[in-house]
Image (cartoon, helix red, strand yellow):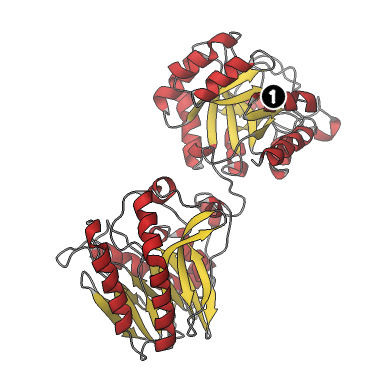
């Protein structure tokens, strides 16, 4: 196979757009029948660095038809497969898209970039919903060759490399810009990718300046990590020949037969050692849509409150949030229990913080709910995180509510556990105690705070403003429409604790509540879902 990467000039000066787009067409016209594969850079429909959404869309509409027609014509004329990246409009918005043209000039596949940086999320406002759902690596098979894909920002997510490797692709198409990395860094990334996927990498970018060592570096790399061609900052065509089916096998450890590098790694892979990932991961708190149902102390109408059966049942049924309470033991362990005292939910007595964790493990936290739960022990915060981190939003009620003696070291333990399981974006702190809100604001300003009910509903919005809280948790019927409207006008999310009847739930939703806390998840979640469907989310 003879592969060609096209590296056109690129500039921050938008006045050069027509000239540089013409260069791109010139390079396509220079491709000949000896070429089997042709790859162009990311955003080939926007030939210079457009900063605003309006400019990007203007150039896209100006050039896209000409660009795609030229690619189709080149594919037919050269009898080559052509890949080009540009915007593509779907029913849900524009997407960063790599188009695949077969040798007949037909679009036979589209790869949608999986990782969108802030500029694409917030400035260009591209469609992002598809990136929030689990998906396997996109593979396109043409003429007996399996193609995988990475686009620009995708290159930085090395955990995706293993997923692509398992698809046994022959060639990875990299339409890219990567305007902030040096040639050396880009070569390291590309060689790493090719070696770890046992695939040829064909990457096309743009040249910022002939003298620059930033950006550019369109290259073709073998599965062994050898660079067949690297254009650095030159413009034009970069060409190399290779056999796409020739793979690299290495000695797979002592006394093992040769194997691809990724297979050698798979022998000993322990996925639980990594940050959370996979199909069970949900959108974090900043992206999860409203209104939501929050299962208060878990699904506690079917299992003991603040227990893994209660939490697990709610999450398995689709709860967007769970709520639970955290206290500390005498020896500093963080545990989940609502009351300060043990008597209501266990066969123990006294305050939870008067006992060590070891002492608490000898108590029965299930029998008082039902004999079928006899022998359940108190639940540690870390155990919740081990099973459910990033699988649900966690509304964490920091106790105590009515004292100002919360230990900073204990609060730091809570933060350390949240960081251990990589879920800062999946939790928020709810507290009725101003001291705890101030402590959270000081020690973890990036974690969302929620003002809890302290008996003075008229002051809750002012407290939210004082402690920069993004949420308020109102108490059942201790509020009015004016309060809800004022909070919403300030951009504050409204929770309500609690609604256990359909009538209450419907009333609160109509008032503008964003999150309904409930002890009866199944019934109330159905009301919330019906409300969302009627309102079109």
> Which residue is painted at 70% across and 19% down in the image?
342
* Quarter assignment of residue 392: top right
Rendered position, 467 above or below 186 = above
**Is 508 or 271 nearer to us in this picture?**
508
| Secondary structure beneath label 1 | helix
Q: Residue 325: x percent and y percent?
A: 62, 25
> Which residue is painted at 23% across and 58% down in the image?
15
Single out the residue that lies furthest toward the bottom: 34
**Is 348 or 98 nearer to us in this picture?**
98
Q: Is disc 1 surrounded by few (<14), some (14 to 19) or many (20+) residues within 10 Å?
A: many
**Is 356 or 140 nearer to us in this picture?**
140
Single out the residue that lies furthest toward the right: 371
Q: Residue 217: x percent and y percent?
A: 27, 69
**Is 85 or 460 nearer to us in this picture?**
85
Taking the image as shown, residue 487 lies to the left or right of residue 48, namely right
> Which residue is painted at 61% across and 36% down in the image?
290
Q: How many marks?
A: 1
Taking the image as drawn, is residue 329 in sight? Answer: no
Quadrant containing the N terminus in the rendered view = bottom left
Taking the image as shown, residue 404 lies to the left or right of residue 517, namely left
Taking the image as shown, residue 12 lies to the left or right of residue 288, namely left
Q: Residue 58: x percent and y percent?
A: 37, 56
Single out the residue that lies furthest toward the left: 211
Rendered position, 91 above or below 519 = below
> Which residue is painted at 75% across and 23% down in the image?
504
Single out the residue that lies furthest toward the front: 62
Q: Residue 197: x percent and y percent?
A: 45, 71
Rendered position, 157 above or below 360 = below
Rendered position, 400 above or below 410 = above
Can you identify the residue that label 1 sits on? 508
């Amino acid at each position: 196979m003879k592969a060609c990467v096209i590296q056109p000039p690129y500039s921050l000066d938008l006045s050069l757009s027509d000239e540089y787009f013409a260069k791109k067409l010139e390079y396509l016209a220079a491709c000949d029948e000896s070429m089997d594969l042709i790859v162009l850079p990311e955003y080939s429909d926007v030939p210079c660095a457009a900063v605003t959404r309006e400019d990007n869309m203007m150039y896209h509409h100006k050039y896209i038809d000409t660009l795609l027609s030229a690619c189709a014509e080149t594919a037919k004329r050269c009898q080559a497969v052509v890949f080009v990246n540009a915007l593509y409009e779907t029913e849900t918005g524009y997407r960063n898209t790599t188009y695949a043209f077969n040798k007949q000039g037909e679009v036979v596949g589209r790869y949608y970039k999986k990782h969108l940086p802030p500029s694409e999320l917030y400035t260009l406002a591209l469609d992002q919903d598809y990136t929030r759902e689990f998906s396997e690596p996109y593979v396109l098979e043409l003429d007996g060759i399996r193609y995988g894909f990475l686009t620009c920002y995708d290159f930085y997510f090395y955990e995706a490399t293993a997923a692509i490797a398992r698809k046994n692709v022959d060639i990875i198409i990299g339409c890219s810009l990567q305007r902030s990395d040096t040639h050396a860094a880009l070569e390291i990334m590309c060689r790493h990718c090719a070696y770890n996927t046992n695939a040829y990498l064909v990457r096309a970018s743009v040249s910022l300046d002939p003298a620059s060592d930033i950006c550019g570096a369109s290259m073709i790399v073998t599965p062994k990590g050898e660079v067949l061609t690297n254009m650095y900052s030159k413009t034009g065509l970069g060409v190399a020949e290779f056999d796409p089916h020739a793979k690299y096998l290495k000695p797979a450890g002592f006394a093992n037969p040769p194997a691809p590098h990724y297979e050698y790694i798979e022998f000993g892979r322990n996925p639980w050692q990594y940050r959370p990932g996979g199909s069970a991961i949900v959108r974090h708190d900043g992206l999860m849509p409203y209104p939501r149902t929050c299962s208060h102390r878990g699904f506690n109408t079917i299992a003991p409150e603040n227990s893994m059966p209660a939490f697990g049942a709610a999450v398995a049924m689709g709860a967007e949030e769970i709520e639970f309470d955290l206290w500390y033991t005498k020896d500093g362990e963080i545990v989940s229990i609502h009351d300060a005292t043990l008597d209501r939910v266990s066969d123990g007595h006294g305050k939870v913080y008067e006992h060590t964790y070891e002492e608490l493990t000898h108590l029965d936290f299930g029998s008082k709910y039902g004999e079928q739960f006899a022998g359940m022990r108190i639940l540690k915060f870390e155990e919740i995180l081990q099973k459910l981190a990033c699988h649900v939003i966690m509304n964490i009620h920091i106790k105590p509510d009515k004292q100002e003696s919360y230990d900073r070291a204990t609060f730091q333990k809570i933060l350390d556990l949240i960081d251990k399981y990589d879920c800062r974006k999946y939790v928020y702190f709810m507290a009725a105690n101003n001291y705890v809100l101030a402590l959270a604001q000081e020690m973890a300003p990036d974690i969302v705070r929620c003002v809890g009910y302290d008996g003075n509903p008229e002051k809750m919005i002012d407290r939210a403003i004082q402690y920069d809280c993004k949420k308020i948790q109102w108490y059942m019927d201790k509020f009015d429409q004016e309060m809800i409207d004022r909070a919403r006008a300030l951009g504050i999310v409204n929770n309500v604790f609690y609604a256990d009847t359909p009538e209450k739930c419907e009333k609160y939703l109509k008032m503008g509540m964003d999150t309904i806390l409930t002890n009866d998840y199944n019934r109330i979640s159905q009301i919330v879902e019906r409300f969302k469907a009627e309102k079109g989310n």
